[in-house]
Image (spheres, grey):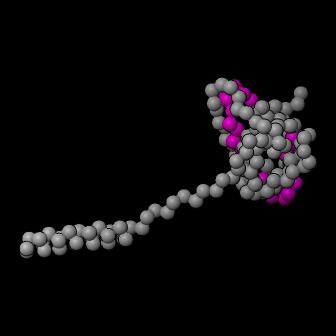
Amino acid sequence: MAILRTTLATAALIALAGGASAQDKPAAPGPIVKTLLQATTTADGKAFAYPDGKPLVTARLVELPPGGEIIRHRHAVSPFIYILEGELTIASDSMPTQVYKAGDSYMEQAAWHSGRNLSDKPVRLLSVYPSAEGVALSERPQ
């Protein structure tokens, strides 16, 4: 009987020690996930598809100073855009002028368009091109 009591007491101490250890170490916090965009079309409502070929993703950080302009262009594959700070005004052939602000995200439109920073603060954006090797990121009118 003494052996049984000793064994039970030892098991209880091990269990308590294990429990205390778990309480002393709080679990690491999990990630906070915010979906920025889930889309099947570009900003102007055109369905997009990925080109054939070897996949290539290009990510760019772009900064546009106050009064700066991104000249007229279009994309073979529309990039995902996330505005980090500032306001970007987009003029397009296919839709009314749009203003995107910090925290906004969109799939760039398929039509010819240009961007301007009409504010007195820089615009910073992340542009991600899900494309293929050999496909130009953008083209400019001739």
- The span shown in magenta is 113-137
Q: Is residue 23 above or below residue 138?
A: below
Where's the N terminus, which quadrant? Answer: bottom left
Can you give x and y, in whole percent of width and height, for residue 12 in the image?
22, 72
Q: Tell me if residue 9 comes above or below residue 64 in the rendering.
A: below
Quarter where residue 130 is shown: top right
Residue 132 forms part of the magenta stretch: yes
What residue is drawn where x is 79% and y is 56%?
101
Marker count (numbered) = 0
Q: Position of residue 45 (x, y in %)?
A: 83, 42
**Looking at the image, which residue is at 70% across and 32% down?**
50
Q: Is residue 93 left or right of residue 78?
A: right
Judge by depth and name the residue closer to the eye, 35 or 65. Answer: 35
Q: Does the magenta stretch include residue 14?
A: no
> Hey, which quadrant is residue 47 in on the image?
top right
**Which residue appears farthest toward the left when viewing the image?**
2
Figure check: 69 above or below 102 = above
User: Can the viewer see residue 126?
Assistant: no
Which one is in front, 71 or 1?
1
Q: Residue at x 65, y 36 (%)?
A: 57
Quadrant of the rendering where the C terminus is positioned? top right
* In front of the other: 124 or 45: 45
Q: Nearer the viewer, residue 118 or 128?
A: 128
Q: Where in the figure is residue 136, as x and y percent of width and height?
A: 74, 29
Q: Can residue 95 be seen in this view?
A: yes
Residue lying at the far front of the rendered structure: 1
**Would residue 82 be found to the left or right of residue 65 on screen?**
left
Residue at 76% x, 44% y is: 107
